[in-house]
Amino acid sequence: MSAQEQDKAAKRAQWEEINRAKALAKRQKESPTDIAMRPSEIKKIFQAIRGTRDLLPPETALWNRVENTAHEVFATFGFGEIRPPILEDSNLFARSIGGETDVVSKEMYTFPDRLEDHPETAKAIQDVMKEQPRLVGLAIATSAAIYPFISLRPEATASVCRAYIEHNMNQLPQPVKLYYMGPMFRRERPQKGRYRQFYQIGAEVLGGNDAPAIDAEVIEMVMTFFDKLELPGLELDINSIGHNAPECRPKYVELLREELRKVKDQLGADSQRRIETNPLRVLDSKLEHEQPIIAKLPRIADHLCDACKTHYAEVKKQLQLRGVIYRENWRLVRGLDYYMRTTFEITAKGLGSQNAVCGGGRYDGLVELLGGPPTKGIGFAIGEDRLILSLQDAGKGAVRQGRDIYIAWMGEHAYAAAVRTAKLLRNAGFSVELPPSELKFGKALERASKLDSRYALILGDNEVSEGMFTLKTLADGTQQKFTEPELLEFLRL
Ligand code: ATP
Ligand code: MG
């Protein structure tokens, strides 16, 4: 298109836009109801975005129980909480997770930031437009090279490493032990146990040395957390994937590639492609017909360098010392370069094929890759959504939702006493329902049992003048009279 034609096209588009707006305004003036949507239509439009969902009571009580348990258990291992932002510079993930991975190339929510906060970029764009005003300036401006892109985090390890560098945490006593919990975002196909906004609870140990005891203790901590929650049917798989030096993993990967080429014709399309791009990932394959072929492939444990071999043996010893039961799984790999040595995965019951509830591993090169000093690192991430599903499936998901006490008050005098009593009982830690308007006695009891209350506290004019409380146990209908101190004592038992 010539510059003249481009101008014309732009003007035409502008006219069309203006005409559309005018037509809409006219229609709105003529018949506003035509444009306004009916409530039922609005209801249909506003639904949670695909792959996201509302977490509601009573389920949120279970989420809180899980998160409180994490706070407690991790604190006993000396971990402190970090709360990194949910938005980060997109480059952080491209660099750490890798631009070639599915997570970054397909699943990340990425968008251009507005330019107000990026005066240098704004000026660069203006300069280009000034020099070549006819140029399709916007196309250049939006090219990833100069435009500031931000992403919703797909995971938090990169953020924790960035924070470690940004706050010079290498000057603190090493290693630094941090944990986090919160939402992550990946644009995957939603299904049971797989969402676009999901939640992770994770921890990282950064700095210090790479003593196998650290690997073992991190794993012990996750298992302790799961045990506290009584998560059923747990299986811990461990492996060592060596490290990125010529005599170790790369040598094995080459050997694996050679062996895979020999059987290429018998593999599916995905695996065939991976022979060249990332042969380790072939070991991940779940395809039925590939299993016997994979079983005959060389195993990394037989090809580790001496240092990695020793490290792995020591990790296993350290796990035994801690009474952690594990299974060695030579096919457990992580596709990313910066992962090394110890890798582990934990699966749970009741989740179908999305049964991994935790993945973790050592990543000694990552902090350096992000511009920090050479730093040892190991961590894990638990899929909280799947953890919750598994607990629910095992019947461990129930958290009592009812009230402790429902105050059935009758009469104005009684109401003042009811307000005062509600305050007293709530201060003592009981959950109290105080109906905002007077109800007939029968109705009040009905509401009390609908709310799954343990007791109804009956307050009528009689009780107020006697200074007594009548407490009805709803399960068996028995009633007792108490003074205030007696009441508190009874409830506390
Ligand atoms: P998967 O193989 O199931 O896709 P992954 O290797 O992508 O998992 P990691 O990046 O290691 O997962 O994240 C750790 C944990 O986070 C997983 O074991 C899983 O429990 C959880 N997880 C990952 N992606 C999702 C998702 N989209 N929805 C819910 N949980 C997820
Ligand atoms: Mg995934």
Image (cartoon, rainbow, N blue to C red):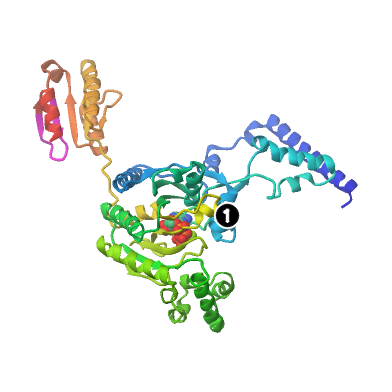
Q: Quadrant of the C terminus?
A: top left
Q: State the image coordinates of residue 431 (x, y, percent, origin top left).
A: 25, 33
* Residue at screen point 79% across, 40% down: 127
Can the viewer see residue 353? Answer: yes
Residue 295: % across, % down: 43, 79
**Part of the protein shown in magenta:** 469-480
Query: For this rendering, which residue is in front, 39 or 103?
Result: 103
Q: In the shown orientation, is residue 16 left or right of residue 205?
A: right
Q: Give the structural element (helix, strand or loop) at label 1.
A: helix
The reply to whether residue 133 is in sight is no
Viewer-proximal residue, 395 or 24?
395
For residue 245, above or below residue 385: below
Quadrant in the rendering for residue 211:
bottom left
Q: Is residue 474 magenta?
A: yes
Depth check: give the residue in front, 386 or 102. 102
Q: Is mark 1 within 8 Å of ligand 1?
A: no
Number of numbered labels in the structure image: 1
Q: Pointer 1: residues within 10 angstroms few (<14), some, or many (20+)?
A: some
The residue closer to the viewer here, 153 or 37, is 153
Q: Residue at x 57, y 54 (%)?
A: 95
Q: Which residue is at a point 9% across and 30% down the rendered structure image?
A: 480
Q: Residue at 33% of width from left, 43% of height from top?
A: 64
The quadrant in which residue 491 appears is top left
Q: Give the image quarter of residue 54.
A: top left
Disc 1 marks a residue whose amino acid type is: Arg
Find residue 215 and report its horizontal and vertical position in percent.
36, 59
Q: Horizontally, is 170 left or right of 390 in the view? A: right
Q: Position of residue 169 (x, y in %)?
A: 45, 44
* Residue corresponding to mark 1: 95
Q: Compared to 138, does 18 lie above or below?
A: above
